[in-house]
Image (cartoon, rainbow, N blue to C red):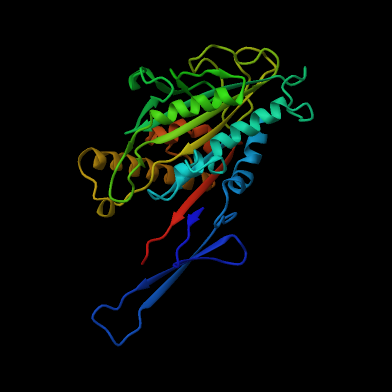
Amino acid sequence: MFGYDASLQVLEDGKTIKVTQIKDNEGRPNQNPSSQSYQFKFDRVLKDASQEEVFEVCASDALRNALDGFSSTIMSYGQTGAGKTYTISGGRGGFQNRGLIPRVVSQLFTFLNDPSSPYYSAAATSPYQVQIQYFEIYNDNVYDLLDITTQSHEITVFENARGSVQVNGLRTPTVSTESEALSLMFEGETNRAVGEHQLNRLSSRSHCIFMIIITKGIGGAGGGERGGGGERGGGERARAVKGEGAICARLALVDLAGSERVAKTRSEGRVLREAGHINRSLSVLEQVIVGLAEKNRDHVPYRSSKLTHVLKNGLGGGCATILIANVWAEAR
């Protein structure tokens, strides 16, 4: 995903971006400007793509994976102002501008309510329970976007005996309709931490995670509205606390706060401190991904930040991880 600029070119394979950096020859009027090119390859480049196309390419298979019992994580990454929140949550310009969260929720309940769907929830062989968590990581502390009365110190992140990471203390309501799930999304959106700087008037100052917990099987997870009461699956198929035959999976949709160069944002005071936490956590995320890619790596630094610790089960192991790189270029 990227905002088009003359310095960016999509090659014919539809998977490669060519970036051309033009350097002015200051003080040398008789010489033409020099240029240097770089190429970056991806699984897919979505140029001028609609929100519907982004959903089909990036999220439709992840949703089916979750319904089949395998966890998935979708992250939107990029510089501040590049369109990450628009990708994950959507814009205000109309129904067609819905982001991944509302589209995933809509498709999920379409599957569960369609008698012709293999995931039809009324079928005796495949009852599903859907629960929602919505929280943000602000200055390396976890805050519940669905219950602003809960203090950060009341929310704990820990690993159980199987190595599955759980966030304890979050409100985790069970939803049975699309409208109930979307109401929770809108409630959480109003509680997000945003700020203003030189590059973005409404810059997200936190990493936001919308977690859909899907439990399949008779006698599912249950357990009220506070998270952490059971094994909620990570990169593995996991049994729920209640119901020995239950299978639980998580689909996490992550709106990462934007990386920032202080020289460009001209941040000061509180916004500057926020930028420091944001950039540090994104740096740790990079270290974790590099560590996972290295064979025979003894240690991966998940615990170096709350972001990577919370997402541990969604980054490695048997889960599917999709990273959407939102790219935009400057005029020069």
Q: In this view, does 43 lie above or below 307?
A: below
| Image spot of residue 294 (x, y percent) | 51, 48
318 relative position to 24: left or right? right
Residue at 45%, 45% in the rendered image:
84
| Residue drawn where x is 55% and y is 11% of the image | 223
Residue located at (31% from left, 34% from top): 139
Residue 157 locus on image (x, y percent) = 42, 24
Q: Position of residue 310 (x, y in %)?
A: 45, 30
Q: Nearer the viewer, residue 127 or 286?
A: 127
Instruction: Judge by depth and name the residue closer to the eye, 52 or 216.
Output: 52
| Residue 72 placement, left or right of 39 | right
Quadrant in the picture for residue 264: bottom left
152 is higher (above) or lower (below) than 288? above
- Residue 44: give x, y in percent of width and height: 59, 55
- What residue occupies the far right of the structure in this picture? 116
> Visible in this render: residue 238?
yes
Q: Is residue 283 above or below residue 207?
A: below
Lateral position of residue 303 relative to residue 45, left or right: left
Location of the C terminus (image quadrant)? bottom left
